[in-house]
Amino acid sequence: MIKVGIVGGTGYTGVELLRILANHPEVRVDVITSRSEEGIRIADMYPNLRGHYDLAFTVPDVERLADCDAVFFATPHGVAMSMAPELVERGVKVIDLGADFRIKDLELWSRWYGMEHTAPELAAEAVYGLPEVNREQIRNARMIACPGCYPTAVQLGYLPLIENALVDHRRLIADCKSGVSGAGRGANVGSLLCEASESFKAYGAAGHRHLPEIKQGLGVAAGRPVGLTFVPHLTPMIRGIHATLYSVLKDPTDGLQALFEERYADEPFVDVMPAGSHPETRSVKGANVCRISVVRPQDDDTVVVLSVIDNLVKGAAGQAVQNLNILFGLEETAGLGIVALMP
Amino acid sequence: MIKVGIVGGTGYTGVELLRILANHPEVRVDVITSRSEEGIRIADMYPNLRGHYDLAFTVPDVERLADCDAVFFATPHGVAMSMAPELVERGVKVIDLGADFRIKDLELWSRWYGMEHTAPELAAEAVYGLPEVNREQIRNARMIACPGCYPTAVQLGYLPLIENALVDHRRLIADCKSGVSGAGRGANVGSLLCEASESFKAYGAAGHRHLPEIKQGLGVAAGRPVGLTFVPHLTPMIRGIHATLYSVLKDPTDGLQALFEERYADEPFVDVMPAGSHPETRSVKGANVCRISVVRPQDDDTVVVLSVIDNLVKGAAGQAVQNLNILFGLEETAGLGIVALMP
Amino acid sequence: MIKVGIVGGTGYTGVELLRILANHPEVRVDVITSRSEEGIRIADMYPNLRGHYDLAFTVPDVERLADCDAVFFATPHGVAMSMAPELVERGVKVIDLGADFRIKDLELWSRWYGMEHTAPELAAEAVYGLPEVNREQIRNARMIACPGCYPTAVQLGYLPLIENALVDHRRLIADCKSGVSGAGRGANVGSLLCEASESFKAYGAAGHRHLPEIKQGLGVAAGRPVGLTFVPHLTPMIRGIHATLYSVLKDPTDGLQALFEERYADEPFVDVMPAGSHPETRSVKGANVCRISVVRPQDDDTVVVLSVIDNLVKGAAGQAVQNLNILFGLEETAGLGIVALMP
Amino acid sequence: MIKVGIVGGTGYTGVELLRILANHPEVRVDVITSRSEEGIRIADMYPNLRGHYDLAFTVPDVERLADCDAVFFATPHGVAMSMAPELVERGVKVIDLGADFRIKDLELWSRWYGMEHTAPELAAEAVYGLPEVNREQIRNARMIACPGCYPTAVQLGYLPLIENALVDHRRLIADCKSGVSGAGRGANVGSLLCEASESFKAYGAAGHRHLPEIKQGLGVAAGRPVGLTFVPHLTPMIRGIHATLYSVLKDPTDGLQALFEERYADEPFVDVMPAGSHPETRSVKGANVCRISVVRPQDDDTVVVLSVIDNLVKGAAGQAVQNLNILFGLEETAGLGIVALMP
């Protein structure tokens, strides 16, 4: 059994890791940390885990974490970069679900995240954990930076178009909608049921932290910088991201459906839907899948890609476990066969 | 008191007319029709109206309707065009909340609505009931075609940019999100709580009936045909439309906030929010208001307009009453001072 | 115009008072206070009020409040009792939407609310503001204690049975369900959309602060102490309370429907539904109404009363305005004709 | 592998069987029937199953079903009793998720279900599939009648009290709340998102089909007929049942927590929560668990039991699989380790 630790286990990505790992055939959670909940049994905090775990939260401690084979950070930015270097040094594989190691340009990182980066060398070494792009590098990595939720949905949707230089890379528009769990488990007024349900709004239209990450990923795929307008929205539901991606075809073509199907033919967790489909976020609720449809309205030169994920699974904890599986040479799908809950 | 009739009073726009008119100081509902509910008291069907109406549904009958000063049609397309000509002939003002009289090009209408138009002369005469554009023509009209819900939100959002030829009119993108009441009160599986809640999806991405209506309106404003990609989405809530509108500025400018504020300075039902705001659909829930924000992300050449309405009010019944007020020379705001319900 | 002040205007009952009073024909809001939001315009905090108010929040100040004809307290317990005595002394009518003046037995009050009562004389004088019971006393009161939300729904449902001594008063069971707005606008984890939506739970089953208030009210109606089991539940919606009230008939009878209809025949805000109905909370959403059905399952000796209100309206702000209307000799329904929003 | 068939696979209990069985280590779904969807691949109807099943719906056919080791009926009442006798005759184990075989008194059954029973002998033989009561009989049964959703939650909650004759069995009150999926996937207006969300109501207060089933089960446990008032309510969420159960203790006692813990100590799917807990329905969303708390408010003689299940899992498909596991001598928990989805 692979022994894993989870730093920051009280947020939604932490409890989601626990949910997924509860049925993973080759992984055992040995340590879970939380400063605020020290001593509390996780089953007392998350009753859905009653009967699945006896573990209690402990204060983060590098010595205990160093006994693990792998450590997940499910923490706000700033935490992983303070602890990951020592763990990596001591041979622990580190998988960060936060933002510390996602962006290669650390000046850019500092501008968006408002702090200095304290682990520049590890940031340079870290592999961006989007298996559909970087599977081989992940296999041999010591440090994985899991993509953000929006960046996962947007990149998987745009990749076939961008990699093949089919669209004007200077005018990409990503109109994205997220369930409220994307805002985390913090007690802020805007996430109250009475504030966020029965309502829909944009936020961060002037600029959102996932913008530089998406541009970095698509820039790599395009081989040059891309221009992107990214507007995130809050939709009144718990889980799910829906990305509606607009771009302009250089040469209008009928071959887009085949292009997408081929690009993802061997990917276990990307599902290209039949032509004419509209993927629903509920079709991935709780499952580690990205479902994609591509459409060309009125057979014009604008192409629209619809891409859905569960932000907590393929957008966070599920993708993290997928990376773990690759890192340790397991079946990539191990523990990730969970079927989406529908209805 | 102005005597009004409502044809098709059992759907959501019908009951919403009743809710608004219950407190209108100068209007009395005399007739409400429904074939399926003949004889049923509306308060028995809609308990929120108990104590406000004693009226019962009757079978549609031109004689009885002709006694009214005005008749609203809250019906599926095809109904209004079969009855309106006679009513107009007999001096009744007709306000159609449906689609029969919205599109001037009747061939185009037939293509999208799948039937022949049977009242072409009245269609030619009908005034498109968007007061922010056509207030003067509405004043003297005999037949009003109320705009659709999406077209209201999209046109009000784009008008300042289009009327002033500030953006590339060939590449407009309207990414729109609607609550489920937009699908009506019909018993179809897709609108069940278990199918539509906790999920988000696009629909009609390849083409939606509101597309030609929006293009017509924006084309008039631009003075030439516009190019538009319109993707509607279903969001898990009852009421509200959020339109996120993208366009490319010909000359990037800082003056957009002022432009929007001036355009709508005298409009009682369009509210330009302060710079930096993100309008929430709940801020208009139950109210006859369109709230708009305009933003230029990263001060680039793409402009994003955020426009929200309650699809049943400013997108349907409220706008219909606003038209009635104009038609009969009342205060335009009469009966429309309802404050949005928040939370 | 009657000049009113609102102390504690940032919570849900405060904004609801503003929504209702915006269209009240004889009332003007002159002062609204909030320590935390001093200087903020209410329309900037609550965009639904844009266009309806220019007022800004000020720090609570007895001098300014003393200029009002009436002052509402929409505050946590402990606040009203510290300011009300001076205001009453200076001739201001005080209407407390909080808990300070609801319970006559101040020892009992202290036990449930965890503090000493600092205005025992005013507490003795205060009139319990349930117009359906105390209309005459309200008329001449100086200090009104508005009932809690659960107590309103439960008392109105039980009164016809208790006042007529038809049921065993020692074995009353009130199973109550509330929307999340009952928990207020405080940022606590349990009220987050991600915690409270798609779930249902009981809370405070061992004891809830509204229990002694309900027992006091029903005890007065019965002429002796009553026995009550009261279990509140949280239901995933914003507004609404549904009370399901069980009791055992001393003599099974067919006359319950008539009894309820007679008891409330002249009440403008209590609606006895037809036999066989099940009132829905949405039928009162935003409206100052309590709708009630009474049923005797299998014609047995257990009677079930179903009672619904909007917790923020008839359970708080609407009832407070109803009290204001009575206090100042206005039409009791002034400003309270708002129709429930449905759908 | 055990070969199973599912009759009526298009409803919510059908798709839930498919979700659970997709990861069952010893079961293979060979046949799934639907008259209306013949030829449609289930993954085209239920996109959450894409990648898990290749099967298409076929018309129900006894010959094909007779090749299965077990057949589930996920059908409206009346269907199972028409096909089950022949299947049982031919050696197929039949598990009915519908109502045909739940009630032993067929006259009573006819009164509540409005039709004659056509398989009285099989009804007499059928075993009521509540493993916590009938595990031994299930082991050797040919025909299993799975309990209804409300009856599961109510019986599991009351059993420790009733079996030990601790409460007045003549005055039981079960106030139950169900998510909307309990109403099935039929397209009826009352289950629309716009009708059922943001609202709460009782239904069937005068009498509901699950009443005689619950009374039968509790009557067996009590050794004599019980008196029960059962009021079901609709709560605005997809999944979950919360039963709040009231009864009067003959001798008030402190030992209830221990009593419940002992009664269910060896039950893999009943979880007695710690004293002072309030189980949330979301803690069982998607999982085959019943979580129970017991409380005695104010240490009085009324005992309140709170019991939650997922109506589609422990209240239907999960319990059906649990019965299958018992029938075929598998681990009772096989395929049922799914963790509830939270948040």
Image (cartoon, coloured by chain):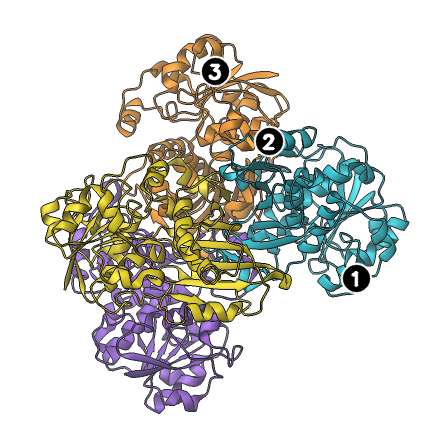
Chain colours: A cyan, B yellow, C purple, D orange
Q: CA distance from mark 2 to mark 1?
A: 39 Å
User: Chain letter of disc 1?
Assistant: A
> Residue pushed farthest front?
B224
Numbered marks: total: 3
Q: Nearer the viewer, residue A205 or C310?
A: A205
Q: CA distance from mark 2 to mark 3?
A: 50 Å
Q: Is residue D71 above or below residue C228?
A: above
Residue that carries the numbered disc 1 in the rendered image: A107
Task: Please name the amino acid that badge 1 sits on.
Answer: Glu
- The disc at residue A257 is 2
Q: Are marks 1 and 3 on the same chain?
A: no
Q: Nearer the viewer, residue C47 or B208?
A: B208
Across and down, in percent, residue D317 comes to 50, 30
Across and down, in percent, residue C91 comes to 32, 90
- Residue D229 visible in the picture: no
- The disc at residue D142 is 3
Q: Are marks 2 and 1 on the same chain?
A: yes
Task: Please name the amino acid that badge 2 sits on.
Answer: Gln
Q: Nearer the viewer, residue C309 or A218?
A: A218
User: Chain letter of disc 3?
Assistant: D
Task: Find numbered disc 2 in the image and state the secondary structure of the residue it sits on.
Answer: helix
Which residue does the image show at 34% across and 36% down from the upper left?
D211
